[in-house]
Amino acid sequence: MALSPGWRAFALLPGTHCGVFRKAPRSSCLSSFPWGHCPWRGTGSSLDPEMKAFLEENTEVTSSGSLTPEIRLRLLTPRCKFWWERADLWPHSDPYWAIYWPGGQALSRYLLDNPDVVRGKSVLDLGSGCGATAIAAKMSRACRILANDIDPIAGVAITLNCELNQLNPFPILTKNVLDLEQDKWDLIVLGDMFYDEDLADSLHRWLKGCFWTHRTQVLIGDPGRPQFRGHSIQHQLHKVVEYSLPEATRQENNGLTTSTVWEFQP
Ligand SMILES: C[S@@+](CC[C@H](N)C(=O)[O-])C[C@H]1O[C@@H](n2cnc3c(N)ncnc32)[C@H](O)[C@@H]1O
């Protein structure tokens, strides 16, 4: 199925056209470190009712077409009004949280199939988007989870997606952790975060700090985006597993056919 011209810009070309990403607000902070004091923590009752209603009206609950049919998510699908509308009619920042990206799908599949990787561990999902990988970590019994995304609306989406999967919401942080000193995590997961060269450079620097300071394990999910394949981080990766993408994800991602989980080993 073809995407509408408006959504094609962000759904098919993440990072290829940096402007699409840069126009979104990037610094709003709904909570502060340490993550234990996050206002999103708890039942989700603190959600802005208007934003919650907007998301419920303009997304569809789905569990099909991804690598993890056991996770239900509110996503933008062809049955949603804004799938077909001009992108400039969307009243908020670009809704990356409304897509379940191939990199995140691979990571989530891996965590669900290999619960030992997260069981009893503290996990940071950096660039959480819809929150699926953090949800997979929770389902596989991670003991502490922080979902981090600089888009505050992602925080609302993640909370709704936790509820959909009958999970107590975990803390969500919308501050840019790349501006902060590295905290101690057992595992950091990043799904489809290497879509922009500058962001990739910042992530690489920051992740090296996590590894050398705390020996944090770092797993990256990526479907082979040029900004990732061409980055110097390639020399410090170990391939963990590669998945063949479902047809629906292939169609939405312009010919990408696989998605791989890499371990960062500087
Ligand atoms: C392509 S989406 C991937 C979302 C999710 N990980 C997945 O795989 O479905 C990238 C996400 O990273 C977020 N993001 C971009 N820069 C960030 C940063 N410095 N810190 C945290 N999140 C960031 C965006 O808001 C967006 O939700």
Image (cartoon, grey):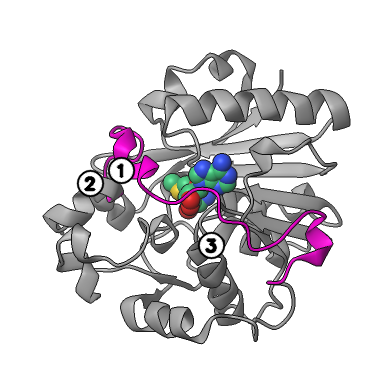
Classify mark 3: helix, strand or loop: helix
Identify the magenta region. Answer: 11-40
| Secondary structure character of the magenta stretch overall | loop
Mark 1–mark 2 contact, CB under 8 Å? yes
Q: Is residue 183 visible?
A: yes
Going by the numbered disc 3, the residue's amino acid type is: Pro
Is residue 43 rendered magenta in the image? no
Q: What residue did someone put label 3 on?
A: 152
Q: What residue did someone put label 2 on?
A: 9
**Does residue 101 lie above or below 55 as drawn?**
above
Cα–Cα gap, marks 2 and 3: 21 Å
Going by the numbered disc 2, the residue's amino acid type is: Ala
Q: Return the residue nearer the eye: 109 or 202.
A: 202
Q: Percent x, y for residue 88? A: 20, 59
Q: Percent x, y for residue 94? A: 35, 55
Residue pictured at 46% horizontal, 56% vertical: 67
